[in-house]
Image: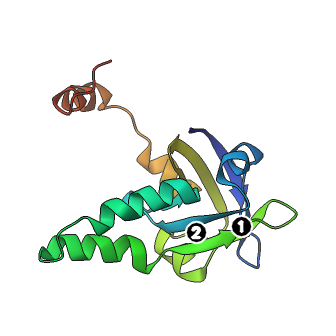
Amino acid sequence: MFMGEYNHSIDAKGRLIVPAKFRESLGDAFVITQGLDGCLFVYPDEEWQAFEEKLKSLPMANKDARKFVRFFLAGAAQVEVDKQGRILLPANLRNFAGLTKDCTLVGVGGRVEIWDKDRWEESTSYDDMDEIAEHMMDLGLSI
């Protein structure tokens, strides 16, 4: 399980250090794709395969399902960690998430998210958590 928050910078060649705690579970190669909320989703191979199977099960006749599948699969890339613990973030993914220099990597259970640091700070207002917690109860999660 991934958890925690780490700040790193992208270098001039588009490389980003992956925190050692995340590398332990991600392995030497893993998948990065466009994520929701303007970040990137990072999946270890096993989690990616499970997610991909769920995407494959969506009905091809449904236009929203086709678009949803394209969103995640078209931009996906397999990356490898170099000897310094860095990955090369493809330009299309950097552009999608607005990543230029400072990034925040966040562990969220079965995946890691990569955020532009400023966007992360803007999106992490927790003023409405009581209301959100009530909605989670509707989804079957009780605290």
Residue 55, image quadrant: bottom left
Q: For numbered disc 2, what is the local secondary structure? A: loop
Name the residue: 56% across, 75% down: 77
* Residue 71 picture location, percent across and down: 35, 74
Dot 1 and dot 2 residues touching (CB under 8 Å): yes
> Which mark, residue 99?
2
- Distance of label 1 from label 2 (alpha carbons): 8 Å
Image spot of residue 82 (x, y percent): 82, 67
Compared across the picture, whether 42 is left or right of 74 comes to right
Three-letter residue code for mark 1 = Ile
Q: Residue at x 57, y 60 (%)?
A: 45
Question: 51 or 71: which is nearer to us?
Answer: 51
Looking at the image, which is closer to me, 49 or 121?
A: 49
Numbered mark located on residue 10 in the image: 1
Amino acid type, label 2: Leu
25 on left or right of 36: right
Q: Residues within 10 Å of mark 1 (few under 14, many from 20)?
A: some
